[in-house]
Amino acid sequence: MCLTVAVSGGYTGAMFSQAPLLRSLARRMIQPAIRPSAVERHQLPRGAAYRISTSDGARQLRCTAGELWLTRAGDPADYLLRPGETFRIAAGDDVVAQALEDAVFCVE
């Protein structure tokens, strides 16, 4: 599941800079839910390509809109991903995702 988080309500960083307790509390409440490095969301226009390298560990690619054509280095097969489908990328693999139509996907 991909999540987009928006913060609203008129709060600014300056408001927290004078309240260390609130700033600390806000960090503890927000950090476990957001984890920005854990999920990357990408949009590709039709025909565009994106390279995914997993030198830091195995990942999973999840298509949420459109169609993606995947090619993995050293693998003679190609793969087609549609919305709701996932593709596991092993540690050390390089994969190129190309949008067959406008696409949105997440790398988790």
Image (cartoon, grey):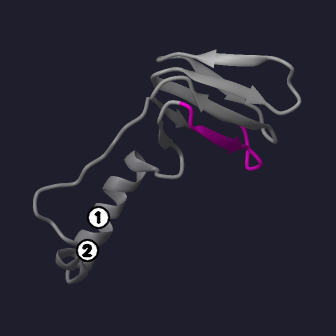
| As drawn, 30 above or below 98 | below
Give coordinates of residue 46: x percent, y percent: 50, 30
- For the residues bearing labels 1 and 2, Cβ distance under 8 angstroms: yes
Residue 60 painted magenta: no
Q: Mark 2: which amino acid?
A: Leu
**Image point (20%, 79%), residue name:** 14
Q: Say what secondary structure mark 2 lies in.
A: helix
Q: Which mark is residue 21?
A: 2
Vertical arrangement, residue 15 with respect to residue 73, above or below: below
Q: Which mark is residue 25?
A: 1
Location of residue 44 with respect to 30 vertically, above or below = above
Q: Secondary structure at mark 1?
A: helix
Vertical placement of residue 58 versus 80, above or below: below
Give the quadrant of the N terminus. Answer: top left
> Could you tell me which residue is drawn at 69 percent across and 17 percent down?
79
- Circle 1: is it few (<14), some (14-19), or many (20+) Cα within 10 Å? few
Please give the count of numbered marks on the rendered protein.
Answer: 2
**Could you say where residue 18 lies in the image, as x and y percent from the top left?**
20, 83
Residue depicted at x 24% and y 74%: 13
Q: In the image shown, does 7 or 51 lie closer to the viewer?
A: 51
Q: Quadrant of the C terminus?
A: top right
Three-letter code for the amino acid on which mark 1 is drawn? Leu
Please state if 84 lies on the left or on the right of 13 as rendered.
right
Q: CA distance from mark 1 to mark 2?
A: 6 Å
Query: Given the current orientation, which residue lies at the most extreme bottom position?
Result: 18
* Residue range highlighted in magenta: 47-58
Return the residue found at the far left.
10
- Residue placed most toward the observer, 72 or 5: 72
The foreground one among 106 and 101 is 101
Q: Viewed as shown, does residue 44 lie left or right of 27?
A: right
Q: Is residue 75 left or right of residue 52?
A: right
Residue 92 on image: x %, y %:
82, 42
